[in-house]
Amino acid sequence: MIYRNPEDQVIDDAAIKTLIDVYGERVTSLPPVAIVIAAYNEAGAIGPVVEELPAEVCGLATAVIVVADGCADSTAAEAVQAGALVADVPVNRGQGAALRLGYRIAREGGAAYIVTTDADGQYNPAEMGRVLAPVVAGEADFVTGSRRLGSQETKDMIRRAGVRFFAGTISLLTGQKISDTTFGLRAMRAEVTGAVQLAQPQYQASELLIGVITHGYKVAEVPATIHRRRVGESKKGQNPLYKLHIPGVNNFFYGARFARVAYGTWWRERQRSKSSSSSSSSAAEPGSEARANGSGPGSVEASASSAAPGGSLTTDAAKRT
């Protein structure tokens, strides 16, 4: 992983160093499945969420990693009390940055698979097995749940329309049919998170999804459920008018920002693809033979056998990963 912002690397390196000092081998020798949660001011919600997470998924042991993203409440303490490995980052950077750090901790700690869920209890932990199973079986490298294939409790018609619109847009841009681009319950091979560029501090769901698709990884969807929030209020779409709760305004801000990230990521990856094609026209692309034989990034076999990018947490945490 190469950081576009040097300050982000400094923050992440410091967080990892502290994590190792506190937890030792618990974080440097993770079990096969790491459940990663980004949390921002989720006191009252994060504890029950962590406590309800399964000790095993698909017969594989799990560890819970919570990245407390500059919280001003007791989120970190509650997560620790519930049994999670907690990276307590002192500055609030956004969900995307928090997940990126969580991915790195999981990947470099030796986890083979990563499952993500939200800190607000909207996703059903009993469905983690359904989401992870295709990855463990070698049928996919990345799996996302879908409320449109499953169910949702929200009656917000604007949000429902937004889910459909962005699913159709990203499907059109990438050439792969996706019914739900923002679902937070996902599963993936750990090395996938080190192969794609993750630069967005917020609204990272579309960036990761588009990056995974454009890199040729196998993507699948499964039916899943999204419940109403248990405690507190959504942090999505925050803006100068957020606390006024004007109908539609927060959804508009969220949609506009999500669109900017989605289109920006698609354009960036499109340019990178063109650049790669130009380079390969004058010289054989390294690894092309492997991909032709079914062992490149788009191959499940290769994803299972390749070393996780980024090294190990037991190495110098200050090095560039």
Image (cartoon, rainbow, N blue to C red):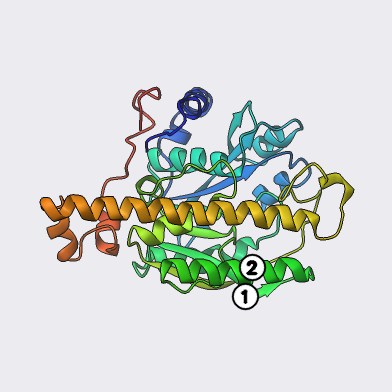
Give the answer, above or below, for where 48 lies relative to 12: below
Q: In this view, does 228 lie to the left or right of 81?
A: right
Pointer 1 with pointer 2, Cβ within 8 A: yes
Q: How crowded is mark 2: few (under 14 residues within 10 Å), some or many (20 or more)?
A: many
Task: State the image coordinates of residue 35 (x, y, percent, origin top left).
Answer: 53, 50
* Residue holding disc 1: 148
Looking at the picture, which amino acid does disc 1 mark?
Answer: Arg
Q: Quadrant of the C terminus?
A: top left
The one of 234 and 189 positioned closer to us in this rendering = 234
Residue 304: x, y in percent?
29, 57
Q: Residue at x 71, y 44 (%)?
A: 47
The single residue placed furthest to the bottom in the displayed view is 149
Occupied quadrant, residue 215: bottom left
Q: In this view, does 231 lie to the left or right of 290?
A: right
| The N terminus - image quarter | top left
Residue 149 visible within the image: yes
Q: Position of residue 280 (x, y in %)?
A: 17, 53
Label 1 environment density (alpha carbons within 10 Å; few <14, some 14–19, many ≥20): some
Q: Position of residue 208 (x, y in %)?
A: 47, 53
Label 1 sits on a secondary structure element that is strand
Determine the secondary structure under disc 2. Answer: helix
**In the image, which disc is placed on residue 303?**
none
What amino acid type is highlighted by mark number 2?
Answer: Val
Image quarter of residue 66: top right
Check residue 163 in the rendering and tell me which mark sits there, or answer none. Answer: 2
Residue sitting at 65 percent across and 35 percent down? 80
